[in-house]
Image: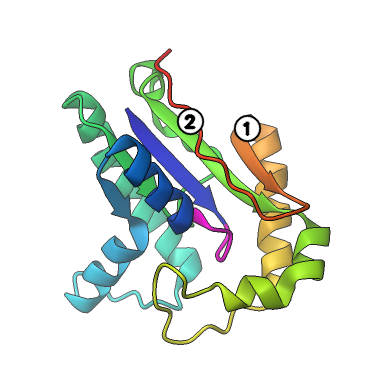
Amino acid sequence: MVVLIGGASHTGKTLLAQRMIERYKFPCLSIDLIKMGLIRSRVTSLTPVDDEALKPYLWNIVKEIVKTAVENGQNLIVEGAYIPCDWQKYFNRKYRDEIRAYFIIMSQNYIKRHWAEIVSHSCDIEYRRSDDFSAYVALSENAENLALCKKYGTNIIFIDGKYSVPVPELRRT
């Protein structure tokens, strides 16, 4: 089984992946690590600030890794902001039956009420050299992801009151 964990920056994707690793003992692939490996090795001329160009570039690689894991019967967690909300359209039914996707989305009210707390936790799991992420960007990205996830029927872990991201129960269909 492959688990995809998506969402905007600072929503807790890596934290959820860590909890799932501990519970299910699945290996995990961070799309940010792939991104930096490709950039540092100069396999691409893209840079960390080329976010819009990085999305399709990285997803093309990641979706093929996901297919390979499914074909090999391997369990895998893939986490990152570069997973599209319409991920299903990239896989036929054989693959979709072996993939579970969850997008962590923070409500507008949550972001407004807890912005300082959100920023204070930005390095809890991974170190961020510079964090120029703004509340405006967070509000925009979370609203866009919410609309897209609803449009495509993607599972949402919605953060509105207290920050709580439960580890989903994984069951085969």
Q: Please give the name of the residue rendered at 67% of the width and 73% of the height, measured from the top-left corner.
A: 117
Looking at the image, which is closer to me, 170 or 87? 170
Asked if residue 61 shows in the view, the reply is no
Mark 2 near mark 1, Cβ–Cβ under 8 Å? Answer: yes
Q: Please give the name of the residue rendered at 56% of the width and 41% of the height, measured from the top-left corner.
A: 166
User: Does residue 105 show up magenta in the picture?
Assistant: no
Looking at the image, which is closer to me, 88 or 78? 78
Secondary structure type for disc 2: helix
Looking at the image, which is closer to me, 172 or 134? 172
Task: Name which residue type carries label 2.
Answer: Gln
Asked if residue 42 shows in the view, the reply is yes
On the image, the x and y values in percent for residue 9 come to 55, 64
Relative placement, left or right, of 104 versus 33 is: right
> Residue 136: which disc?
none
Span highlighted in magenta in the image: 8-13
Relative placement, left or right, of 4 versus 62 is: right
Relative placement, left or right, of 133 versus 113 is: left
Q: Image height check: is 146 above or below 138?
A: above
User: Does residue 12 show up magenta in the picture?
Assistant: yes
What residue sits right under mark 1 in the picture?
Answer: 152
Crowding at dot 2, Cα within 10 Å, few <14 / some 14-19 / many 20+, comes out as some
Q: Please give the name of the residue rendered at 44% of the width and 65% of the height, measured from the top-left corner.
A: 53
On the image, the x and y values in percent for residue 36 come to 29, 71
Task: Name which residue type carries label 1.
Answer: Tyr
On the image, the x and y values in percent for residue 6 come to 50, 49
Quarter of the image where one finds residue 137 = bottom right
Crowding at dot 1, Cα within 10 Å, few <14 / some 14-19 / many 20+, comes out as few
Task: State the predominant SS element of the stretch in magenta.
Answer: loop
**Mark 2 vs mark 1: which is more N-terminal?**
2
What residue sits right under mark 2 in the picture?
Answer: 88
